[in-house]
Image (cartoon, helix red, strand yellow):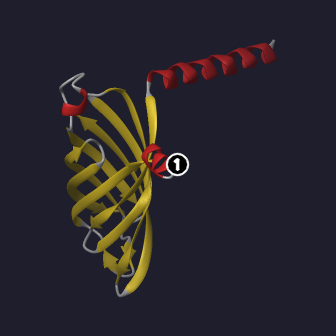
Amino acid sequence: MMNFRSAVTVLFIFSLSVMARAQYTMHKMVSVGYAYQNQSFGELGGKLLFLKHDDVIYRLGGSALMGSAGSKFAIMPKLQADVLLNFEKNVDFYHSYYLLIGAEGTNKYIAPKIGVTLFGILDLAGGYAFPIADARLNGKELKGLNVNLTLNIPTVFIHDMFK
């Protein structure tokens, strides 16, 4: 009897995840950019873009921030989550700009941010970073103004370029 319940539970959870996934379209993107956080960093990573309608888009990403801190080269992992909002529905190409609201976190700081994005491809965002405990990067405290300029390139575009 317990095996039957377990099998039904697993099947139910699997079917819910398939139905939930079927409602959103997912796109993979490669991201490159610049981040300022008391130091200048180059950024390289990837993002997943989820959308159901064109007025609200969700993005999850991971990247590496690379730069010089305390006269030494440093690499810092970064995770981020964004919501892109535009309150005009079904306007396709003319629906070019979105309000970007999100947060990013590294092993040194957490930063809520707000900004704008053009087609979800070119982002300009800013926020304020709060350090995690007494975390420092090569002796440099990373708190205060946070600015990001990012180019998100869909992998479909990259694939089509080399065909």
Examine the image and state in which quarter residue 119 appears. Answer: top left
How far from the left and from the top, in percent, is residue 77?
Answer: 45, 63
Q: Is residue 54 above or below residue 3?
A: below
Q: Residue at x 24, y 51 (%)?
A: 113
Q: Quadrant of the N terminus?
A: top right
Going by the picture, which residue comes out furthest to the front?
A: 163
**In front: 11, or 24?**
24
How far from the left and from the top, in percent, is residue 153?
Answer: 38, 50
Q: Residue at x 44, y 58 (%)?
A: 45
How far from the left and from the top, in percent, is residue 145?
Answer: 19, 64
Q: Residue at x 37, y 64 (%)?
A: 43
**In front: 85, or 113?**
85
Going by the picture, which residue comes out furthest to the bottom?
A: 71
Mark 1 Cα within 10 Å, few/some/many (few <14, many 20+)?
few
**In front: 161, or 11?**
161
106 sits to left or right of 150? right
**In front: 106, or 118?**
118
100 sits to left or right of 106? left
Examine the image and state in which quarter residue 81 appears. Answer: top left
The number of callouts visible is: 1
* Residue annotated with mark 1: 163
Secondary structure found at label 1: loop
Going by the numbered disc 1, the residue's amino acid type is Lys
How far from the left and from the top, in percent, is residue 19?
Answer: 53, 19
Q: Is residue 65 above or below residue 30?
A: below
Q: Residue at x 50, y 48 (%)?
A: 159
